[in-house]
Image: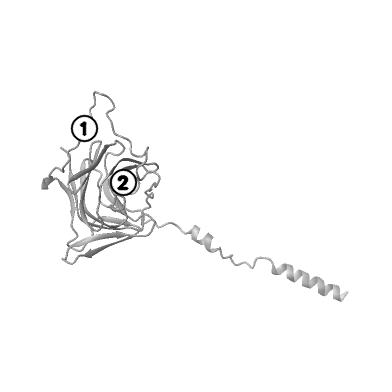
Amino acid sequence: MKRAFIFLSVVVLCACSTQPSGEPIEPSKANTEAAKPSNTSEPTYITPPINTNTLFPTDTATPTLEPTSTNTPTITPTATMTPIPTESILYYEDFEDDRVDNWFVYRGNWSLNKEADGNTYWLGTGPNNYPQTWYSLDASTWTDYAFESKVRIVKGGVFICIRANKGSSFYNAYLSSGDGWVIFADFDGKTYNTFGGKSFPIQNNKWHTVRFEVQEDKLRLYIDGELATSATRTSHVKGGVGYYMGGGEEVHFDDLKVYSLSD
């Protein structure tokens, strides 16, 4: 009888030892990280896609732009850039004060560097997660304008954006020194469509003056004063400017200018 009592006591003690001690159970690391609030101080942007299936010329990616009727002739843009008066400048930055003002950097590494002659330029690079930077001040009144900058591609390519709501929607112009191809794209936050692609040679490790114009429904891209490609589009009517890359590139920027093209 005594042995049975001892055995029963041991069973009861073991059963009691499996009950909660009253202290909270520590959640797993995965649950802890999932429960953390997002950083509300930094806005979250929709990742601008790079559709590799349509980025480069295909039978469907670069349709020929033709008049919709015989009563609506195709407007041929000028082959050279129109000089812009100084009073039309909306924004200018040459980085010679060793500062980058009014730009929000999202992902990647962006830094100021100096050349042997003392010229200061902005360098952008980063891993494969869409390094990007956007003009941070209010550009809600920017409708018809030209975004011009000096661009030097060391590796890869770059997307130059206009009428942009930061990374949520924009037009862009892609240029790369590797394939000698330029092309436009339209992103509305969900759908990314390319159009207006053309062959255009771009040298590596050389400064190119790139001007991306938008005026009403017309898009024009000039490189070193020569018209590289043009098209028409009606998706976006206003917004700011920006740059982004797919990742792994190195691109240099200098002498950023935004000119009004409004009458």
In the figure, is residue 225 to the left or right of 174?
left
Q: In the image, what residue occupies the spot 69% across and 67% down? A: 18
Q: Where is residue 39 in the image (x, y as percent from the top left)?
A: 40, 58
* 1 or 2: mark nearer the eye: 1
On screen, 57 above or below 105? Answer: above
Along the horizontal axis of the image, is 117 left or right of 137? Answer: left
Instruction: Give the camera-side residue of 69 and 36.
Output: 69
Quarter occupied by the N terminus? bottom right
Q: Distance between the residues labelled 1 and 2?
A: 28 Å
- Tell me the element at label 2: loop
Q: Position of residue 26 (x, y in %)?
A: 56, 65
Where is mark 2, residue-wise? 165
Say which label, 1 or 2, has the lower sequence index: 1
Find residue 96 and report its image quarter: bottom left
User: For this rendering, which residue is in front, 45 or 28?
Assistant: 45
Q: What residue type is labelled 1?
A: Ile
Residue at screen point 60% across, 67% down: 23
Residue type pointed to by label 2? Asn
In the rendered image, which residue does mark 1 sit on?
A: 75
Q: Where residue 2 sits: x, y (%)?
A: 86, 76
Q: Nearer the viewer, residue 54 or 8?
A: 54
Question: Image quarter for residue 83?
Answer: top left
172 lies left or right of 115: right
Whether 250 is drawn above or below 72: the answer is below
Question: Hey, which quadrant is residue 27 in on the image?
Answer: bottom right
